[in-house]
Amino acid sequence: MTSTKYIFVLGGVTSSLGKGIISASLAKLLQDRGYRVTIQKLDPYINVDPGTLNPYEHGECYVTSDGAETDLDLGHYERFLDVSTSQANNITTGRIYQNVIQKERRGDYLGETVQVIPHITDEIKKSIEALGKTGDYDFVLTEIGGTVGDIESLPYVEAIRQLRWEKGKDSLVIHLTLIPYLAAAGELKTKPTQHSVKALLELGVQPDVLVCRTEYPLNKGLKDKVALFCNVDSTEVIESIDTSTIYNVPLLMAKEKLDQVVLKKLEVKSEREPDLSRWKSFLNRLKNPVAEVKIGLVGKYVELQDSYKSIDEAFIHGGVMNDCKVKVKMIHSESISNDTAEEKLGHLDGILVAPGFGTRGIEGKIEAIRYARENNVPFLGICLGMQCAAIEFARNILGMSDAHSTEMNPETQFPVIDLMGSQLNVQDKGGTMRLGKYSCKLQRNSKTFRMYNQETIEERHRHRYEFNNNYRKDFEDHGMMPVGINPENDLVEIIELENHSWFVGVQFHPEYQSTVNNPHPLFIGFIEAALKYHKNTDAN
Ligand code: GLN
């Protein structure tokens, strides 16, 4: 293609309509037609990145391979497209202002009054065009967080208005809105959508395509009505109906011809239809499992579904590869103690202890791991979950009764998990953890090696604390084997328990790299072990 096309996705009426999934689905359809596609998320909050946010605020913090702490929508982009994203794919208002203020201090605007328009809007435009200018993409999709009408979205809408004007046919605006169903009237209502489009028009933006989220199918009459009142053709009113799995959405969008409408508007002649065969075969296996396992996800942010988004999705991918439905039961770590462990965990086929920070709920996590270790229940510990596995082992097998991480107990006699040397002088909390991709060498005779089937792997990280190598020998002598080591700094990345059905702790986050096309080997292996455990316990 001669020039990069820019597609903007803005939401209206309410949040949580699934802009990320619609963007990822459209991108998938374009990718499966052979185009090079990337998606970017612009978030109108003032945090420089979501790394400092509690998961209760915005759900999981997703980490890219270049070490950016980002919005969880980037996880969907990667899972759908199987293409790595980077810092450039997630920009917040905080970062935009930080850049502008740095330039002001440097003297880049010497003599000028620095203002929202043009300086902030120019910086937003620059961030959007940066991906296109790499020459790596035919399409750049830019999703704007929040809802049209929010005060904090205004500079973004203005930047899009300008880009739409400047780029003409090389750009397009998709507006995702809600068509609510009023049970009392027994009717779908278009008025909120009309108002939302009006709000956009007041800001100078005419949407080119409307994607309407709905509980019930939109008939022709309703599409015509929306079209007439919103200045679009009725073929440009796309139904986005509620569905049982997000992985259905690319197919639903293909059926609604979203990709065709977009290509037509952008005057791109596509030579081929999207090849969705691989996606369909994944969906087919997802919808027709032959077995089922129950996995306990032990964490402390269990009230909010999105807190462990990538883990949930990696379970779906790992389950599909085993033709197995994975029922994930969220278990609050604060509810687990020696007394309640059997009742809370006894019915499970596998236990995953989640990543996390701070003291709250830590003893419950350690107790859950004791239960998994003693009862031969398949166990996967991720980041803090791996650290807790080391603490549990030190306390209950090595006899170090007050063993701990210095994150929770700086005074412990046995700091089996300790602050990384590189973190000693770090004061700021934002973006200062050990972040992003690092390599790890696997021991050939380990279970982990068998799953990856390669000696050197690369995985993403997000932590400040590490396994304390002073205790390594003691652990090994008692059967907790460090089977994955960072070749540059000797950091223990993976521990594996001998004489156990499947007990693996990883300092990194495998869940970030699991995609539909490339389900993560550790999740495949974990579900396989859970299935085996399920069959064995069933037989007894
Ligand atoms: N709190 C731990 C650390 O900083 C673990 C972090 C995590 O689970 N992502 O090392």
Image (cartoon, helix red, strand yellow):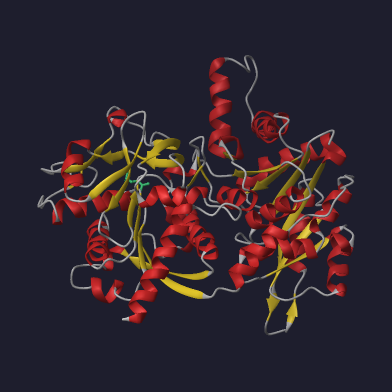
| Vertical arrangement, residue 368 with respect to residue 137, above or below | below
Question: From this viewpoint, is residue 307 visible?
Answer: no
Residue 262 horizontal/vertical position (percent): 82, 51
Residue 459 horizontal/vertical position (percent): 45, 42
Q: Is residue 411 left or right of residue 259?
A: left
| Vertical arrangement, residue 185 with respect to residue 400, above or below | below
The quadrant where residue 414 appears: top left
Q: Is residue 407 left or right of residue 248?
A: left
Quadrant location of the N terminus? top right
Ligand 1 is in which quadrant of the figure?
top left
Residue 431 horizontal/vertical position (percent): 43, 35
The quadrant where residue 6 appears: top right
Q: Nearer the viewer, residue 257 or 455?
A: 455
| Vertical arrangement, residue 4 with respect to residue 30, above or below | above
| Vertical arrangement, residue 455 with respect to residue 381, above or below | above
| Residue at x 58%, y 15% (from the top left corner) | 107
Total numbered labels placed on residues in the image: 0
Q: Nearer the viewer, residue 234 or 422?
A: 422
Quadrant location of the C terminus? bottom left
| Residue at x 63%, y 51% (from the top left corner) | 150
Q: In the current view of this chain or complex, which residue is farthest to the front?
A: 445
Q: Nearer the viewer, residue 295 or 221?
A: 295
Q: Is residue 457 left or right of residue 504?
A: right
| Residue at x 55%, y 50% (from the top left corner) | 75
Residue 340 horizontal/vertical position (percent): 23, 73
The quadrant where residue 237 appears: bottom right
Question: From this viewpoint, is residue 370 visible?
Answer: yes
